[in-house]
Amino acid sequence: MQDFDPSAFVSVSHVQSAAVITIVLAFIGYLMTFLSARMLARRRDKLKLVNKRLNEFYGPLFVASQAGHIAYRALLKKQGKQQAHPIRDEDLEEWVLWMKTIFAPLNDVREKIIIEKAYLIVEEQMPQCLLEFVTHVVGYKAVMARWTEGDYSERRSMIGWPPEFDGYVQRSYEALKAEQTRLMHGAVWQLLHRSRKHL
């Protein structure tokens, strides 16, 4: 009868343990790779949507709104007024010129973006200020049609400028830019950025 060799048992046990550990580590590695790839794909999809919203909706809307605001302030400064309305008789010719050459084209750009790219809005429902903006622009189209016929009895749209419009556009643009930066730079950049804020 052969003597029992405990060292042989130990070596078999070590081999089995090593094999189990190798399998477990391989599975963990696979799982980490799978989860990492999934997270990267989600981040890529989110970034793609954010970029589309910025490039096709909120970016052009923001630029056109800023340009309109700057032009409006320049007109008021030129006329020495705090606000455009009421439009005085002595200001009418210049008002019509600025409406036809600056404000209406900028409004048309924004109206087209809102109507054709509404599916890119961040909210689930169409924001009221965007609807009010479109109706404001449509109101001016009726006024300007009368101007082409020589009738200047109406000088502005019957539907007023929506006061929340510019703020909404700016807030949405800035929030999307921040999200774009976060998605592009990832978690490591966020940790560094947060730690710098606390210094």
Image (tube, helix red, strand yellow):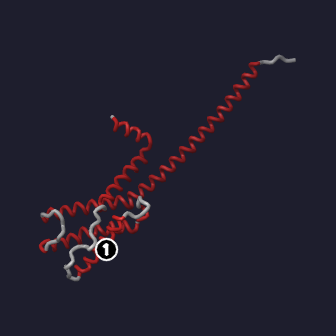
Q: Residue reaching furthest right? A: 1
Between residues 119 and 102, which one lies in front from this camera angle? Answer: 119
**Residue 8: quadrant of the picture:** top right
Which residue is drawn at the image coordinates 51% and 47% (left, top)?
Answer: 39
Quarter of the N terminus within the rendering: top right
Q: Secondary structure at mark 1?
A: helix
Q: Residues within 10 Å of mark 1 (few under 14, many from 20)?
A: some
Which residue is drawn at the image coordinates 37% and 63% (left, top)?
Answer: 127
Is 78 situated left or right of 48 in this image?
Answer: left
| Marker count (numbered) | 1
Q: Which residue bears the numbered disc 1? A: 138
User: Could you tell me residue 63's position as x and y percent?
Assistant: 30, 59
Is 131 situated left or right of 99 in this image?
Answer: right
**Residue 119: quadrant of the picture:** bottom left
User: Could you tell me residue 165's position as x and y percent?
Assistant: 31, 62
Q: Residue reaching furthest bottom? A: 149
Tell me: residue 24, above or below residue 119: above
**Residue 159: quadrant of the picture:** bottom left
Three-letter code for the amino acid on which mark 1 is drawn: Val
Is 131 situated left or right of 100 in this image?
Answer: right
Quarter of the C terminus within the rendering: top left
User: Could you tell me residue 173's position as x and y percent?
Assistant: 35, 55
Tell me: residue 184, above or below residue 57: above
User: Could you tell me residue 180's position as x and y percent?
Assistant: 40, 50
Which residue is drawn at the image coordinates 43% and 48% (left, top)?
Answer: 183
Between residues 50 and 123, which one lies in front from this camera angle? Answer: 123
Which residue is drawn at the image coordinates 48% and 51% (left, top)?
Answer: 44
